[in-house]
Amino acid sequence: MSNDEIILTPEGLAQLEAELEELKTVKRKELAARIKLAISYGDLKENSEYHSAKDDQAFMETRILQLEKMLTKARIADKADSSAVSVGSFVKLHDIEFKEDLEYRVVGPAEADVYQNKISYESPLGKELIGKTVGDIVTVDAPMGLIKYEVLEIRSS
């Protein structure tokens, strides 16, 4: 994998493409209408609606550029299988110290979302998990100290 390459699951690629399409079509039109309305209020120096809309426009255009750059560097992860952890795998872990089971999906950095239990293969835990098999013990150096997990299960979907 090259440093510029961004690995995505098929679902992650679809999400980024959908976000880009919405920003370029729907959101651009909405912002153009907001700016036009704000301009109609007059004096632009003290027009907070205008400045807010322009700030939102700058943020949106930056996000569009980010997405376009990511998509040009994107590569779909090879089909995950259940023999070893790879990008796209669902992994059930057992936290040895706290005696609790956790489940994560290993994804690309653009898809990572801790609230949905999606961890990046570039995260400390993700790095340790790649290539591991059921029964392996992984040790992660976290801010609160070393955490040990046992790999209980690997699923491709």
Image (tube, grey):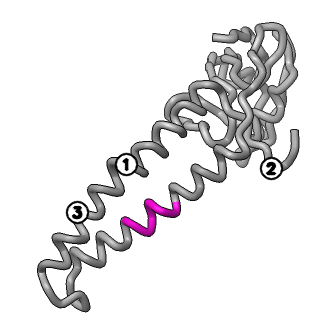
Task: Classify mark 2: helix, strand or loop.
Answer: loop
Q: Quadrant of the N terminus?
A: top right
CA gap, disc 3 to disc 2?
37 Å
Q: Quadrant of residue 40?
A: bottom left
Q: Within 10 Å of the Cα at label 3, are there few (<14), some (14-19), or many (20+) other Cα atoms?
A: few
Looking at the image, residue 46 lies above or below residue 68:
below
Task: Classify mark 1: helix, strand or loop.
Answer: helix
Of 2 and 143, the residue lying toward us:
2
Identify the magenta region: 57-62
The type of residue carrying mark 3 is Ala
Q: Mark 1 sits on what residue?
A: 25
Magenta-colored segment: predominant secondary structure: helix
Residue 60, x across and y down, in percent = 44, 60
Of 86 and 149, the residue lying toward us:
86
Q: Mark 3 sits on what residue?
A: 33
Residue 62, x across and y down, in percent = 52, 63
Residue 102, x across and y down, in percent = 62, 20
Determine contact: label 3, label 2, CB under 8 Å: no
Task: Classify mark 3: helix, strand or loop.
Answer: helix
Q: Quadrant of residue 117?
A: top right
The type of residue carrying mark 1 is Thr
Residue 150, x across and y down, in percent = 78, 17
Q: Mark 2 sits on what residue?
A: 4
Looking at the image, residue 43 lies above or below residue 137:
below
Of 60 and 99, the residue lying toward us:
60
Disc 3 vs disc 2: which is toward the camera? 3
Say whether residue 149 is left or right of residue 119: right
